[in-house]
Image (cartoon, rainbow, N blue to C red):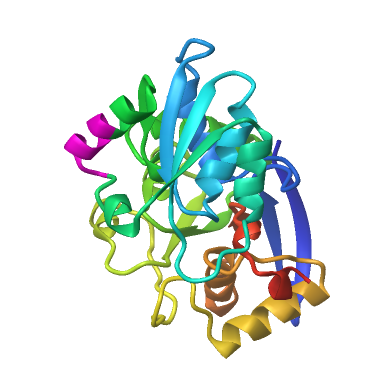
Amino acid sequence: MLTKDHYQLGERGFDVLYLGDFDSPCHGNKYFKLLGYLDSLPSNTHILSVGGAYSNHLYALTAFAQQFKISAFVREPFGEFDHSHTIQCLEASGIAVEWVSSNEYQRRYEQRWIQGALSKSGADVFIPEGGNGANAEHGIKHLARLINQQLGVPTQLFLAAGTGVTAQYLERHIDPQHQLVVVPVVRPNQFCQVLQSPIVYPAPRIRFGRLRESDHELIRAAQAIGLCLDTVYTVHALRMLLASPYSGMPQVLLHTGGLRHNPPSVLG
């Protein structure tokens, strides 16, 4: 399921480890986190989850649409909406989509809201946005085993992190011969207090997902060598890899997916 390719950008050589095939929803860290929730559920269980119109987590849920009944509460987008690829995949998979207001979406972690959402949808099980929770560890442990099998020598791994769930569990289960370097893309990050791995921050941005011109330049340079970066996570992890001193170990960028978030101008 994992593939590794080598790239050369200027004088720097590095590898990219792809967490699955991007043409399939069975890829990326979101998919592996869902495995931790869904492996133990009986077939036909009615599942409810939540996310945005471009959510990689909701897209990953479509991989399980034949096995479970799934409903999704999706935050109403701001401004004009072009019916995202993610929503199209949800609907094509038979997943029921219900739009919720931004104010209601902000309550998605409240137990009272979750119970009300379950009652409203008739679902049996609620999976938090991003699959972020203790159940995710089972899936990330499986991902760590695949990474350990793929990498036979001590390797420095660069991982972009949002909530930090993947980083925490990957650190716990990755072979200790490897060094995990975590690149948070959201500030502040409470998870940094529990990680033993090195943590490096990219330059702060005005808004989450808002790119600087230097980010666009890096995306274009990567495209020129056949490497497609998403605009929220991997672009910043690659920048930190390129800026880091050579450690003597092979350096690998963990490409966690997220390309469907990219606007057409970036995807080319």
Q: Quadrant of the N terminus?
A: top right
Q: Residue placed at 45% from the left, 15% from the top?
A: 41
What residue is at 52 percent from the left and 49 percent from the top?
Answer: 178
* The quarter of the displayed image where residue 229 is located: bottom right
Q: Nearer the viewer, residue 9 or 88?
A: 88
| Span of residues in magenta | 109-116
- The answer to whether residue 12 of the structure is visible from this angle is no
Locate the C terminus and report the quarter of the image it occupies.
bottom right
* Percent of width and height locating residue 121: 38, 28
Closest to the observer, 198 or 109 = 109
* Magenta-drawn stretch, dominant element (helix, strand or loop): helix
Residue 161: name its quadrant: bottom left
Residue 34 visible? The answer is yes
Q: Toward the viewer: 17 or 88? A: 88
* Image-based side of 98 in relation to 8, left or right: left
- Queried whether the magenta region covers residue 111, the answer comes back as yes
Residue found at the very far left of the displayed protein: 112
Depicted 222 relative to depicted 119: above or below: below
Tell me where residue 120 appears, x and y as whole percent: 33, 29
Residue 223 belongs to the span the image colors magenta: no
